[in-house]
Amino acid sequence: MTDIVKETSEALSPASPTPPAALAARVRTLAPTMTRSMQRVAEAVAADPAGCAGLTVTGLAEHTGTSEATVVRTARLLGYPGYRDLRLALAGLAAHQESGRAPAVTATISVDDPLADVVAKLAHDERQTLADTAATLDVHQLGAAVTALAGAGRVDVYGIGASGLVGQDLAQKLLRIGLIAHAHHDPHLAVTNAVQLRPGDVAIAITDSGSTFDVIEPLRVAFEHGATTIAMTGRPDGHVTQYADHVLTTSAARESELRPAAMSSRTSQLLVVDCLFIGVAQRTYDRAGPALAATYEALAHRRPTRTPSR
């Protein structure tokens, strides 16, 4: 297990520091999972990137009431080798915000909000969630996942609850371009099917928290049987990544009483699903194009035809 965790940590370490455009998104995504002292550092750099960029590691530690070690750990969790790299990114983020392109933060949806405000707030959060996911999604990991799927003999997708609905969407998309893909939301059936996977097959676990046992267990079984494993999660440090060859990080809109994480995470998960689908369709276009056309034609008779008006 220790070796697996070590290998996973190395795989999750970014090949290059997180770009400034992705820093704010990474703070929003990871802050809820940090210790309180690390949250103070993350919240400080997100609230005032220009001011924090001018502070030394000691200065930021004093400013946030933490220690130098906490500042360095926070920088590394955000995707930077050290504090110096974080300071450079903060300077870049400050310049980006000064250009006027930084979005305003909306308030949490309240019980007595008018529907017009609810629509506006949800639309803003959806846009922000998609932008955050696009900014933090590791394209190299995505490419590796696409390559594995394009050559897969069989694909199993595991998800529970809202993530299960996303898994069904992914399986249905892959089926339409000629892949043998199945979504499993029953944990017993998921494990039973995972036992049948072999090298060349692919297993995908979808869990925003990264800790859903009923999703992790079949992925572990698939991993141990040699299948290529992929984790789609909002927690790149979550337990599910211990059994994942490739990790696709998603972002969630801000959680609230009326909109729990299980609901807000679907927007980013569906974006990653579409990225996977398009990537596989591109790689296998000679097969995917005719398969998609054939499935469309097979369903054509089920679409109602309009009766010409007289």
Image (tube, grey):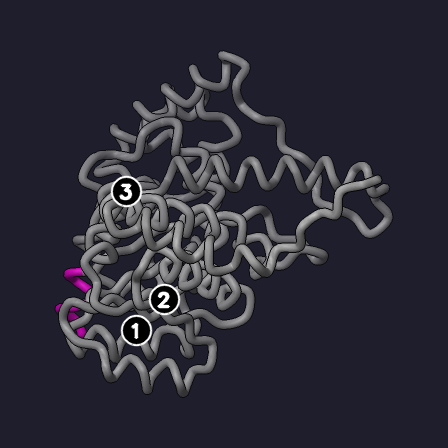
Q: Earlier in the sequence, mark 2 or mark 1?
A: 2
Q: Is 6 inside the magenta-drawn segment? A: yes
CB contact under 8 Å: marks 2 and 1: yes
Callout 3: helix, strand or loop?
helix
Q: Position of residue 235 (x, y in %)?
A: 39, 57
In the rendered image, the quadrant that contains the C terminus is: top right
In the rendered image, the quadrant that contains the N terminus is: bottom left
Mark 3 belongs to which amino acid?
Gln
CB contact under 8 Å: marks 3 and 2: no
Give the residues in magenta.
1-7
Hey, which residue is sitting farthest top in the picture?
Answer: 99
Q: Main secondary structure of the magenta part?
A: helix
Mark 1 belongs to which amino acid?
Leu
- Between 105 and 132, the residue placed more toward the observer is 132
Q: Earlier in the sequence, mark 3 or mark 1?
A: 1
Checking the image for residue 282, the label placed there is: 3
Q: Position of residue 95 (x, y in %)?
A: 43, 15
- Between 41 and 218, the residue placed more toward the observer is 218
Checking the image for residue 204, the label placed there is: none
What is the distance, in whole Å, between disc 3 and disc 1 at their CAs? 26 Å
Q: Nearer the viewer, mark 3 or mark 1?
A: 3
Q: Earlier in the sequence, mark 3 or mark 2?
A: 2
Mark 1 is surrounded, within 10 Å at the Cα level, by few (under 14), some (14 to 19) or many (20 or more) other residues, namely: many
